[in-house]
Image: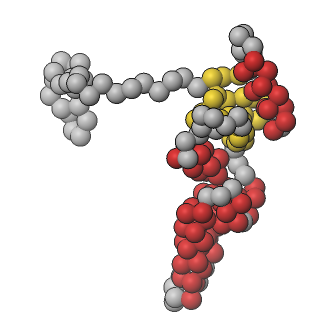
Amino acid sequence: MASFVVMEAPEGRDEAVYVRDGFHVLAFLLPPIWLAWHRLWIEALLAFAVMAVLGSLGGVSGFGDAAPLLSLLVSLYVGLEASAIWIAALRRRGWHEWGVVDAYNRDDAETKHLFAEGSDAVDDRVERAPPMPSPDPLSPRPVPAGPALGLFSYPGAR
């Protein structure tokens, strides 16, 4: 069973995007194309530029064997972080996170989301995202009482 993050559209539009959390094989195999398919233009250009630079690094003496491995690391990063990159792009466009749904596939996630949204009693397999706390700019930060040990201080320790 997979986890799907449900992203709802900005106010006025009644649509949702279901982003599967996990490794995306197509994002690993073709990072710039996967990013462009999901309309992540800046990320696609950045991935293409980094992979092109790393590919051309193979022509420089001493980097012949390392260039394909570094390019593979970029592909691995995009494959692992594809869902996080997509969710971050949706947040920048004004979408908000409804919650997380455990489902077998996208259609099952959509069904669970729509039934959970319409009922008052939310299924225990549906986890709603907690609201983000608003910062209080007027409250002072607590000052540690004891001495700092090394680089880190231990607040409340005497």
Q: Is residue 45 left or right of residue 158?
A: right
Q: Quadrant of residue 149?
A: top left
Question: Residue 32's x, y, as percent?
Answer: 66, 66
Question: Residue 45's x, y, as percent?
Answer: 58, 69
Q: Is residue 139 left or right of residue 76?
A: left
Residue visible at 72% across and 21% down?
Answer: 117
- Above-or-below relation of 98 to 49: above
Count of labels in the image: 0
- Above-or-below relation of 90 to 34: above
In this picture the colour scheme is secondary structure
Residue visible at 63% across and 23% down?
Answer: 128
Question: Residue 42's x, y, as percent?
Answer: 55, 63
Q: Residue furthest front?
A: 12
- Above-or-below relation of 13 to 68: above
Q: Nearer the viewer, residue 34 or 120?
A: 120
Residue 53 in view in this figure: yes
Residue visible at 79% across and 32% down?
Answer: 110
Q: Quadrant of residue 77?
A: bottom right
Question: Residue 148's x, y, as percent?
Answer: 18, 32
Q: Is residue 115 left or right of residue 8?
A: right
Which part of the image, by quadrant, shows the N terminus? Answer: top right
Residue visible at 26% across and 28% down?
Answer: 137
Q: Is residue 31 left or right of residue 107?
A: left
Q: Nearer the viewer, residue 116 or 149?
A: 116
Which part of the image, by quadrant, shows the C terminus? Answer: top left
Residue 74 in view in this figure: no
Q: Quadrant of residue 120?
A: top right
